[in-house]
Image (cartoon, grey):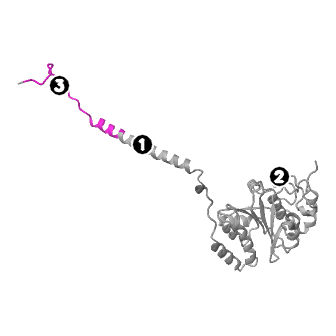
Amino acid sequence: MKNNNNGNGNTKLILLHPYIQKQAATSSNRLWLLAVLSFFTIAFLLTLIYTRDDPATLRSPPPLPTSVINTLVHYASRSNDTFHMSHAELKSVSDVLRKCSHPCNLLVFGLTHETLLWNSLNHRGRTVVVEENRYYAAYFEELHPDVDVFDVQYATRAAELGELLASAKELVRQECRPVQNLLFSECRLGINDLPNHVYDVDWDVILVDGPRGEGPDAPGRMMSIFTAGVLARSRKGGGGKTHVFVHDYYRDVERVCGDEFLCRENLVEVTNGMLAHFVVERMDKDSFQFCRERNGTAAKRSG
């Protein structure tokens, strides 16, 4: 019988240990997993790059439907609250908010019956409310955390209207000028203790419905109207306009300060003798006259 051994009579046998086979399989699975993860990572990055500037991804959220706006205004005007606005007054403000570019910046002086309505009508926009009563402001913000409310202490009295106007006119080229950052102002009529970012916003709509204005000892709305006028004229965006509404326009303080700091030339309409609507344009920083028609043109610093 022929021998199949190669002369030396030794047979070599190679065995694969099960651990080695398992390790090889695990390595293969890891490679597949790494490949899959790499594929999805690259796909995600490509999607991010090619859709980053896609207008469809940057489109503003749609405004509230007209039917919803009309319903909100209707029921708000039917309130049993004695101090609520009429349907015509609510509609005047809501019409402006409806046409406002999104996101719209709305500043409101005074926590009132309509506060939640304004916040709802300014859907997906920025709404800030300034309130004189710090306790009511904290209470309201706790109930409605989606509304930004800041409290302000007014150091004026309605009876001081004449004195305050005289002081503002005297300092119109200094502390009480129409274009400035009120955060650094010492004008008695300027509100300078709001959070810093409030002064950096280009406000599209400002509603003055506070503080209290009934009687000579009430704070009066001299400060809020003056501040609204300065904020509107100090917009950083070129060619911007601000719609300013003043409620209770039949009262002396509201009418006199509206004419002085928002100006008759900017008055669009007065609804029911109660709500004045002004459209105030941005001014150059070297303007020192609130109303252009008073002397024909805005007063400029000589030299």
Q: CA distance from mark 3 to mark 2?
A: 98 Å
Span shown in magenta: 2-27
Name which residue type carries label 2.
Answer: Phe
What is the secondary structure assignment of the residue under circle 2? Answer: helix
List the single residue furthest toward the top.
Answer: 7
Amino acid type for the residue under numbered disc 1: Ala
Residue at the image position 30 percent from the left and 35 percent from the top = 20
Between circles 1 and 3, the one closer to the viewer is: 1
**For residue 263, which numbered disc appears in the image?**
none
The quarter of the displayed image where residue 180 is located: bottom right
**Does the magenta segment cover residue 215?**
no
Q: Which residue is mark 1?
A: 35
**SS at circle 1:** helix
* Label 3: how many Cα within 10 Å (few below 14, some 14–19, many 20+): few
Residue 217 visible (yes or no) = no
Looking at marks 3 and 2 on the same chain, the residue that comes earlier in the sequence is marked by 3
Residue 182 location in percent, x, y?
Answer: 82, 55
Q: Would residue 271 appear left or right of 21 to someone viewing this image?
A: right
Along the line of sight, the residue nearer the viewer: 270 or 55: 55
Q: Going by the picture, which residue comes out furthest to the left?
A: 1
Q: Amino acid at mark 3?
A: Thr
Image coords of residue 23 (percent x, y): 33, 37
Q: Which sits earlier in the primary sequence, circle 1 or circle 3?
A: 3
Which residue does the numbered mark 2 point to in the structure image? Answer: 184
So how many labels did they put on this image? 3
Disc on res. 11: 3
Residue at (71%, 64%) from the top-left corner?
A: 100
**In the rendered structure, which disc, 2 or 1, sits on the residue that comes first in sequence?**
1
Residue at 62% across, 64% down: 62
